Image: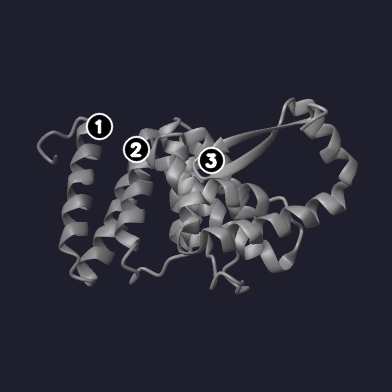
Amino acid sequence: CASGILEERPQGHEVVYEFRHPLVRQTLYDEFGLQRARLLHGAVAEAIERHYGSVALDHADELAYHFARTDSSRLRGKAAHYLIAAGARALERRADTEAISYLEAALERTSDSRPDDTGGVSVRKVLPLLARAHTHVGNFAQAQAHWRAALEALDPSSPEYPDVSRALALTEMWLGNHDEAMAQLDRGLGAAQASSDERGIVRLLVARSHVHQEVGQRAEA
């Protein structure tokens, strides 16, 4: 502080230290070397998680930043866990590009076949969120690919199947694939009817009416 490298200031009941210039911080960071930096990110991430305790998810962005920069297989699941949480929060506030960045990083760390220390973070959590984020920014081809992958990961008896089926069908419609959209809605309706999912049935029927309107079939709509 006396040399002007760090600056101290009060923040609530704490004293906070910050670098006066980001170039100083970056220079010191670069001197760690890649492997040591990764180890330190892991140590910092676990310390922050312990500090926040039961409200750690409220600080998902901060935790995702550090967990994602470790190379420990032990922390891979936690990185995915907080990246998904940060991506979901970004999606809620319509920071869609930020959400895509978080969720794509999460997708790289998820697996349906290997359990991890978060209790098993599944691609089924990530794909629908990522598809919605791509839809919001108009990347319908990417959204289509993610909705298809999400649907393939589900059994038709799954409660999520009708909603994912509907989302894929609407994406197909926006891409101009009206026949495929209608076929997908029929598959979704079959699943919803088999499970007596009245909400799903209604939503799928409304989506069918949209597709009929798109192709000028007003009576059917």
1 or 2: tag closer to the N-terminus: 2
Q: Nearer the viewer, mark 3 or mark 1?
A: 3
* Image position, residue 11 (x, y; %): 53, 38
3 or 2: tag closer to the N-terminus: 3
- Which is nearer the eye, 94 or 12? 12
Query: Disc number at residue 47?
Result: none
Local packing at callout 2 (Cα closer than 10 Å; few below 14, some 14-19, many 20+) is many
Identify residue type, mark 3.
Answer: Ile
Q: Is mark 3 on a helix, strand or loop?
A: helix
3 or 1: tag closer to the N-terminus: 3
The scheme the figure's colours follow is one colour
Q: Is residue 12 above or below residue 80?
A: above
* Image position, residue 219 (x, y; %): 9, 37
Q: What element carries label 1?
A: helix
Q: In this view, does 143 lie above or below 152?
A: above
Residue under pointer 1: 214
**Residues at marks 3 and 2, CA–CA distance in whole angstroms:** 22 Å
**As drawn, is 166 to the left or to the right of 121?**
left
Q: Nearer the viewer, mark 3 or mark 2?
A: 3
Q: What element carries label 2?
A: helix
Q: In which quarter of the image is the C terminus?
A: top left
Q: Answer yes or no: do the residues labelled 1 and 2 have beta carbons within 8 Å?
A: yes
Residue under pointer 2: 173
Identify residue type, mark 2.
Answer: Met
- Which is nearer the eye, 168 or 34? 34
Query: What residue lies at 57% left-to-right and 59% top-to-bottom?
Result: 51
* Image position, residue 103 (x, y; %): 55, 48
Query: Can residue 157 be spotted in the picture?
Result: yes
Count how many numbered circles sit on residues in the image.
3
* Image position, residue 1 (x, y; %): 76, 33
**As drawn, is 198 to the left or to the right of 13?**
left
